[in-house]
Image (cartoon, coloured by chain):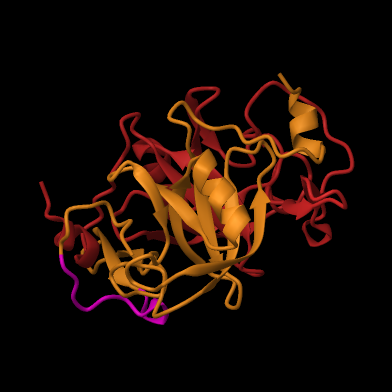
Chain colours: A red, B orange
Amino acid sequence: MTARADIERNGELCIAWNEAGLVPAIAVDAISGRVLMLAWMNAEALERTLATGQAHYYSRSRQRLWKKGETSGAVQRLRELRVDCDQDTILLIVDQAGEGACHTGARSCFYRRVARGADGAIRLAFVSSENPPVACEASGTEGEQG
Amino acid sequence: MTARADIERNGELCIAWNEAGLVPAIAVDAISGRVLMLAWMNAEALERTLATGQAHYYSRSRQRLWKKGETSGAVQRLRELRVDCDQDTILLIVDQAGEGACHTGARSCFYRRVARGADGAIRLAFVSSENPPVACEASGTEGEQG
């Protein structure tokens, strides 16, 4: 087992997969710098992403490898892949093709912010800069299609 | 159970906690726009964050609520909190106090990128713009202190 200080400082890729063999992967738009989405990767998804230069994830709902944009065309070309200090999270800097990363049609999946209503209650408000969906269809998976 | 299309479109905060009662939370620097870190939140961490305007997380290693910067002073003042389409990930836009978000001293936890060595092998290279740590100490937790 590699010591923690080594995992944080050295040059060895040594992903700390969780008990399901996955880690969260954050995709960031290379041009705007904004966070597009969070998905999950297993070892195969990471390997395919590095080998092809196209973002691949692991769909927990469908329990299979998933090339981002395989049906929608909204592929993500990898510019850079990073790991965090303890190597249990991956960051992808990508060129996002198509309208955006979110299956709803929004540019980013993070198109709603928490806001207080006039009555002080917590509500969600759409963030106009993220081109939030005006309509979307339920499709039974967990937001990972496309 | 709220229908998926409603979860994606409506104004109700309805977090899809995982089986451990947690969701990943991405912290983004309000000024640079860069991703600082990924940690985990439970319902109490979310509530405390919204109530105090200071980022709180749940430490999986210590199994307790954790106010970011409680020991290091590197607190995160919340500017905006967002949810993703299916509400299983939180995004915090924060003003990061101190040197940075990472317990190693780096500005961002994502201070290493995957690179190919001269021999074609995959290695990690430091990203100079993230002020990567030149030295750090092992402390036995999972990178969540500070």
> Looking at the rendering, which quadrant does residue B38 occupy?
bottom left
Q: Is residue B36 left or right of residue B102?
A: right
The percent coordinates of residue B115 (x first, y second) are 33, 65
**A29 or B81: which is nearer to us?**
B81
> Looking at the rendering, which quadrant does residue B50 occupy?
bottom right
Quarter containing the C terminus of chain B: bottom left
Vertical placement of residue B86 versus B70, above or below: above
The main secondary structure of the magenta stretch is: loop
The percent coordinates of residue B52 (x first, y second) are 58, 60
Instruction: Give the residues drawn in magenta, as a range.
Output: B127-137
**A104 or A66: which is nearer to us?**
A104
Vertical placement of residue B11 versus B53, above or below: above
The percent coordinates of residue B70 (x first, y second) are 38, 65
Q: Is residue B115 left or right of residue A38?
A: left
> Looking at the rendering, which quadrant does residue A33 occupy?
bottom right
Total numbered circles:
0
| B124 within the magenta span | no
| Residue B144 appears in the picture as rendered | yes
| Residue A54 appears in the picture as rendered | no
Q: Residue at x 82, y 54 (%)?
A: A131
Vertical placement of residue B93 versus A88, above or below: below
Q: Residue at x 66, y 47 (%)?
A: B83
Quarter containing the N terminus of chain B: top right
Q: Residue at x 32, y 36 (%)?
A: A18
The percent coordinates of residue B34 (x first, y second) are 54, 70
